[in-house]
């Protein structure tokens, strides 16, 4: 049986670790024992500490197979990038502001926010849950465009349903029939 000496690093060489990028939680069904957003962040943090998928899953009480299934789900691009960064693997940067690259709608991204795993000297210190202001503004712009379209369609339908108003007579609320149509002066 061969035994290999442990890999040694020079004492003065700093251990380089990549910063784990913030990510949107993968959309999953609401279950108490499932992959909640906080559990996803804890998994990424444990993965950065242990460098082992099995060890990280054991630390948070989830199965390894379910972790790989979660990584393959639609909308898991940010989670997969955080996973790769935690393992120190190179990964393609994910544009968190784009629904094309994340697979998530602006409404979901603005509601759920961003999860940021906080590490200090190779240990998980906690998780920050940040608002995704960019997604909020995108969602607001989408709603504004939708309302503008509804308003334009409503104005058009009202114009088609109503006969054209005559320009010679002006009606004021509360005016009697046959009375003058000029409003009383304001005091």
Image (cartoon, rainbow, N blue to C red):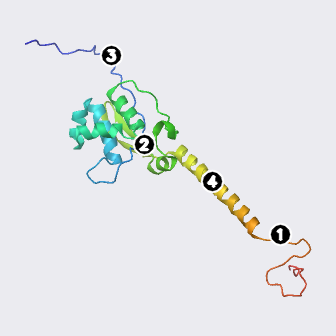
Name of the residue lying farthest toward the left: 1
User: Mark 4 or 2, which is nearer the eye?
Assistant: 4
Q: Which residue appears at 21% of the width and 34% of the height? A: 55
Disc 4 to disc 2: CB gap under 8 Å: no
Picture quadrant where residue 115 is located: top left
Residue 24: assigned label = 2
Residue 13: assigned label = 3
**Secondary structure beneath disc 3?**
loop
Disc 3 or 2, which lies upstream in sequence? 3
Disc 1 or 4, which lies upstream in sequence? 4
Quote the CA–CA distance across marks 3 and 1.
83 Å
Is 110 in front, or is 173? 173
Residue 159, image x, y percentages: 76, 65
Disc 4 or 2, which lies upstream in sequence? 2
- In the shown orientation, is residue 96 left or right of residue 48? right
Quote the CA–CA distance across marks 4 and 2.
24 Å
Residue under numbered circle 4:
144
**Secondary structure beneath disc 4?**
helix
Picture quadrant where residue 74 is located: top left
Q: Residues within 10 Å of mark 1 (few under 14, many from 20)?
A: few
Residue 14: assigned label = none
Disc 1 or 2, which lies upstream in sequence? 2
Residue 164: assigned label = 1
| Figure check: 40 above or below 147 | above
């Amino acid at each position: 049986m061969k035994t290999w000496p442990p890999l040694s690093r020079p004492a003065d060489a700093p251990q380089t670790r990549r910063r784990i990028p913030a990510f949107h939680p993968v959309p999953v069904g609401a279950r108490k024992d499932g992959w909640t957003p906080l559990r996803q962040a804890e998994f990424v943090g444990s993965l950065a500490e242990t460098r082992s998928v099995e060890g990280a899953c054991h630390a948070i009480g989830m199965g390894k197979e379910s972790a790989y299934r979660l990584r393959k789900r639609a909308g898991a691009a940010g989670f997969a990038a955080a996973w790769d960064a935690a393992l120190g693997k190179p990964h393609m940067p994910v544009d968190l502001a784009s629904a094309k690259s994340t697979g998530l709608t602006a409404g979901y991204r603005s509601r759920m926010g961003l999860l940021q795993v906080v590490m200090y000297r190779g240990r998980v210190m906690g998780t920050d849950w940040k608002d995704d202001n960019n997604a909020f503004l995108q969602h607001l712009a989408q709603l504004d465009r939708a309302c503008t379209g509804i308003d334009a369609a409503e104005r058009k339908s009202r114009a088609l349903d109503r006969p054209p108003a005559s320009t010679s007579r002006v009606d004021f609320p509360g005016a009697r029939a046959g009375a003058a149509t000029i409003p009383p002066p304001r005091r």
